[in-house]
Structure formats: C-alpha cells, structure tokens
Amino acid sequence: MTVDLICLLILALWSIPLNHIPAIARVSASGVKWAMGNRDTMPETASWVGRADRAQRNHHDNLAMIAAVILTAQVTGQTDGVTAIAAIITVALRILHGVAYIAGIGPVRSLAYLGALVAMLVIVWRIFS
C-alpha cells in the first residue's frame, strides 16, 4: 500500500474520534437515558462541544474531495514522493484543523485548513504533470 493510501486510511479513521467526541460529551452531560432515547432535545454543553460538531462536519465535507484526489492519483499511477509528502501534510494539517477547531484556536484552524487545501492541490498538480 502506498503512503498516499495509508494517509487516506488515516483520514478515514480520524472520523471515529471526531464522530464520538461530541456524542460522549453530550452523554456525560445528560446520562445514558438521554443517549438511549430519541434525543429530541439537546443538552446544555460547553461551547467546545458545538465546535466539535462543526469540526466533524467540516472533516466529513472535505473527506470525499480529498479521497477523490488521492484515489485519482493512485488509479492513474501518478503517485510519487511529492504526492506522498503532500498526503502526509494533508493528514497532519487536517488532524491539526480538527484539534484546533475543538480547542477554539481560530487562527491555527484556518491556517491548517488552508495548508491542507494547498497540499491537496499539489497532488492535483502532480496528476496533471
């Protein structure tokens, strides 16, 4: 398996903590009875829980695009050292993005997002070169 695909797998698996962090926080605030119910109302939680929800949505919104780029490079045989480094940077910055989002560090979150986007565009550039 190439470095690019390993990075894609890591990004897919990063969905697991992003999915569960806000849910665990809500269960901690409301108890198992709320978790086992219909969840018609949301419990009052700290502001970081809402940021965790938004980080999760952002990750899921971007994962398909990142996957399409990495898989296109893989299928077309355009992976190389440059795409591997770009994929590693994408993973590192996407994880940093999620952590910074939850922590409420806006400038770091924004720079991580932009950096990951640039790294992904490097892979696109390598596909067409």
Image: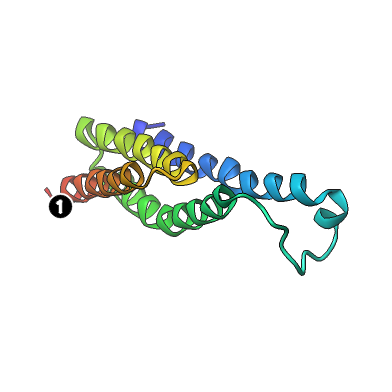
Specify whether 83 is left or right of 10: left
Q: In this view, which residue lies farthest toward the right?
A: 33
Q: Quadrant of the N terminus?
A: top left
Residue 100 x/y as whole percent:
42, 41
Kind of residue at badge 1: Phe
Q: Secondary structure at mark 1?
A: helix
Q: Residues within 10 Å of mark 1 (few under 14, many from 20)?
A: few
Residue 111 x/y as whole percent:
27, 44
At horizontal 38% and vertical 37% (from top left) the residue drawn is 91
Q: Nearer the viewer, residue 93 or 125?
A: 93
Residue 23 x/y as whole percent:
68, 50
Q: Quadrant of residue 122?
A: top left
Colouring method of the image? rainbow
Q: Nearer the viewer, residue 17 or 88?
A: 17
At horizontal 36% and vertical 32% (from top left) the residue drawn is 2
User: Total marks drawn?
Assistant: 1
Residue indicated by mark 1: 128
At horizontal 77% and vertical 69% (from top left) the residue drawn is 40
At horizontal 76% and vertical 44% (from top left) the residue drawn is 28
Q: Nearer the viewer, residue 3 or 37?
A: 37
Specify whether 121 is left or right of 15: left
Q: In this view, which residue lies farthest toward the bottom?
A: 40
Q: In this view, which residue lies farthest toward the left?
A: 129
Specify whether 36 is left or right of 9: right
